[in-house]
Amino acid sequence: MPDIRIYPAEGKWVVRAAGAVIAESRAALELVEGDAPFVICFPREDIAMDFLAPSERTAEHDAFGMAAFFHIDGPGGQLANAAHAFDAPAQEHAQIAGLVIFDAGKVTVERV
């Protein structure tokens, strides 16, 4: 299993998708898994959840458990399965429970 590190993400992070700002947070976490690029995990209270619609897709992750996916609906159309969350990760990664991770290939995640 790869080395997993979770840190407070310094600064203010935003997500832009489907023609809108979807999230903006100073309380995000940075997750680094092995040699993979880091991802930013957003608290739901910092996300415009009206843009997210639950997907039927799920996926199992060895370290974090079951991921539930979300579509993003916005002025620019729908981005299918563009975000996911682990609602019940393993105890050693409990700090990411319920946080939303956006697919950087489908949306723009940046520090501003």
Image (spheres, helix red, strand yellow):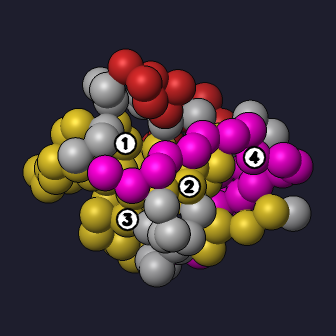
Horizontal and vertical percent position of residue 27? 74, 35
From where the camera sits, is residue 96 visible?
Answer: yes
Taking the spot 29% from the left edge, 63% from the top edge, the residue there is: 81
> Between disc 3 and disc 4, whose residue precedes?
4
- What residue is shown with label 1? 85
Q: Earlier in the sequence, mark 3 or mark 2?
A: 2
Whole-percent x, y for residue 68 in the image:
24, 44
Q: Which mark is residue 32?
A: 2
Circle nearer the viewer, 2 or 4? 2
Label 1: few (<14), some (14–19) or many (≥20) C-alpha neighbours in 10 Å: many
Type of the residue with mark 4: Ala
Instruction: Give the prevailing secondary structure in the magenta stretch.
Output: strand
Q: Residue at x 48, y 56 (%)?
A: 33
Which span of residues is magenta-colored?
1-25
Assess disc 3: are there few (<14), some (14-19) or many (≥20) residues with their C-alpha within 10 Å of its C-alpha. many
Q: Residue 82 bears which disc, if any?
A: 3
Instruction: Estimate the x, y position of residue 32 in percent, counting from the top left.
Output: 56, 55
**Marks 3/4: CA distance?**
21 Å
What distance separates the C-alpha of mark 2 from that of mark 1? 15 Å
Amino acid on which the number 1 mark rests in the picture: Ala
Instruction: Kindly identify which residue carries mark 4.
Output: 9
Disc 2 and disc 4 in contact, CB within 8 angstroms:
no
Question: Which amino acid type is marked by label 2?
Answer: Val
Work out how far the residue at label 3 is from the one at label 2, CA to CA, in angstroms.
19 Å
- Mark 4 and mark 1: span between their CA atoms? 17 Å
Membership of 70 in magenta stretch: no
Q: Secondary structure at mark 1?
A: strand
> Residue 102 at x, y = what percent?
48, 59
* Mark 4 or mark 1: whose residue is earlier in sequence: 4
